[in-house]
Image (spheres, rainbow, N blue to C red):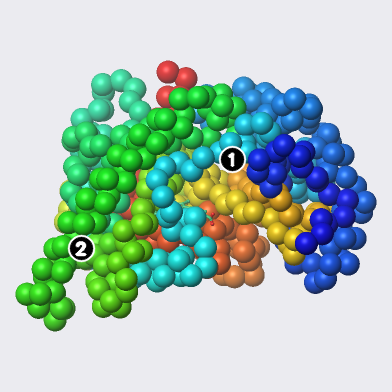
Amino acid sequence: MAQPACFFRPRKHHRTPYQRATYIRHGGKARYASDRKRHEDCNDGSDINEWRKQGFGWSWLFCHSFVLLRCASRFPPLANINILMQELSKEYADTEMFLMDLWPSYPSSIPIAGGPSILSFNSSDWNQWRSLLNPGFSAQSLMNHVPFIVGSVQIFSDKLRASVGKGVFFLGDYATRLNFDVIMKVTLDSDINYQFHKHILPTAVNTTTRWHSFWDPRILMNQLRPVIQKYYGRKMESCIDKELHRQFQGLKAERKASDAASGNSKRPLSVISLALESYIDQNKEKNILETATLDRDFARSNDTTSATIVFALHLMSKHSEACSQLRKEHDSVFGTDVSKTAKTLKAQPSLLNQCRYTLAFVKETLRIYPPGGNMRLGTLEATLLALNGKIHPTERLNIVLANQPIHMNPRIWVKPNEFLPERFLVEPGLGLYPPNGEFRPFDIGPRRCIGQELSLTEIRTVLIMTARVYDFNPEYEE
Ligand code: HEM
């Protein structure tokens, strides 16, 4: 197929030309060119080289890498890439998209670890996996796990209590440990007790995540990176494979004894048990379970949920009015005797659904601090329509949907800089109501986050069990 006119032509020696540059979109619209002619007309004759040099200091040698590094240096060391995108996108308010060329660091990007996963599958493999995993992640199935989640949050809360008066502590660490316990139990039916003990899986996930970056040349060009990622990737795979194998054998045995087959099992079934159940039912070839792993998904889901817990507690400390609204709601749903909250919630998990303000609080947290995003490879058919009316082809480019700038875009949101959980409680169409399709922390469409209900359940439980018990004070400076 011929190249689209007037667009980026990679250097000959370049190994993966399509990863040469990235569009960051923080507004604007994606669209599909209906015919080749329209596609050739794109970009109003402007050349990719012009785009590269626009605005931020692009250089032949390092392209935009130092632009990102310079921007990162203005923020605390562990600042999320989304915050940097938010900062950079301010310079492009007129187009609502910009080009980021991160050669030579970006093309060498290597998957975090292991083999294929649901995140990277396409079409039929993805369909098969998604339909196997969907039942375990459904709201109905997750209700069965609420008692376990409450128990884990109780441990988290006890650990907070034990830290009171003992100086500054790192909340992110507590949240990460809680989240691993929840995810391992709900997805794999595995009690790793990470809030008390070390475990190889979280260690492996945390190490590979630390050694991963989408853009930082210091990490991407480090020669040790592939070795470390491979080593810990193997550890993750073997740990998860062992669990899968254990469950698969267990279920087959149960089936043989015809107990589970008649649906008599009383224990809440984990995501993987439900997937294996329907897998056995469908009697498909065993191949898919042997080759696929969940590792990348664990890496992603772990830091997104725990980051949101930390952000929610942080926002609680910053917004006293919203915090007292939360407390009022918890008093009215669970009664004023705080010591009974865990017991009540374990006995009646559906009370979670009565906490509408709590859910709105979590959503507003996710609007202001969306921990995830998405990236897609451009195609010949897809083009981007910038706010200034220019159409840009996308073939050979990565398109990043930068959720943070989208969520804070004043053209799209009413009072975007204010923390207003109420915007998720008003009637559709009224002033503050979120614009259609623009609230996207979990993404929208068929590839939206499968773990959305699980993380919302966990984060709400944390708020319900901590908001009335503690006052939080951010101590970042210390
Ligand atoms: C606050 C928490 C979370 C956020 C903000 C989040 C965000 C996202 C986003 C934006 C995507 C779409 C990525 C893309 O299309 O490229 C995604 C996909 C996914 N997430 Fe989450 N996630 C969260 C929690 C979880 C949890 C708890 C799990 C599972 C334990 C999980 C598992 C997945 C999986 C498997 C996919 C791929 C879905 C598919 O391709 O069909 N996520 N997530």
Q: Nearer the viewer, residue 345 or 437?
A: 437
Outermost residue to the left: 257
The image position of residue 34, as x and y in percent, is 80, 72
Q: Is residue 113 left or right of residue 252?
A: right
Q: Nearer the viewer, residue 471 or 386?
A: 386
The image position of residue 27, as x and y in percent, is 71, 53
Label 2: state its secondary structure.
Answer: helix
Amino acid at circle 2: Phe
Looking at the rendering, in which quadrant would you find the C terminus? top left
Outermost residue to the front: 13
Q: Is residue 90 left or right of residue 371?
A: right
The image position of residue 162, as x and y in percent, is 20, 30
Outermost residue to the right: 45
- Counting residues from the start of the chain, the first of labels 1 and 2 encountered is 1
Question: Residue at label 1?
Answer: 82
Looking at the rendering, in which quadrant would you find the N terminus? bottom right
Amino acid at circle 1: Asn
Label 1: state its secondary structure.
Answer: helix
- Name the quadrant containing residue 392: bottom right
Determine whether 223 is above or below 464 in the image. Answer: above
Q: Nearer the viewer, residue 279 or 324?
A: 279
Camera sees residue 305 = no
Identity of the residue drawn at 41% across and 35% down: 229
Question: Residue at label 2?
Answer: 248
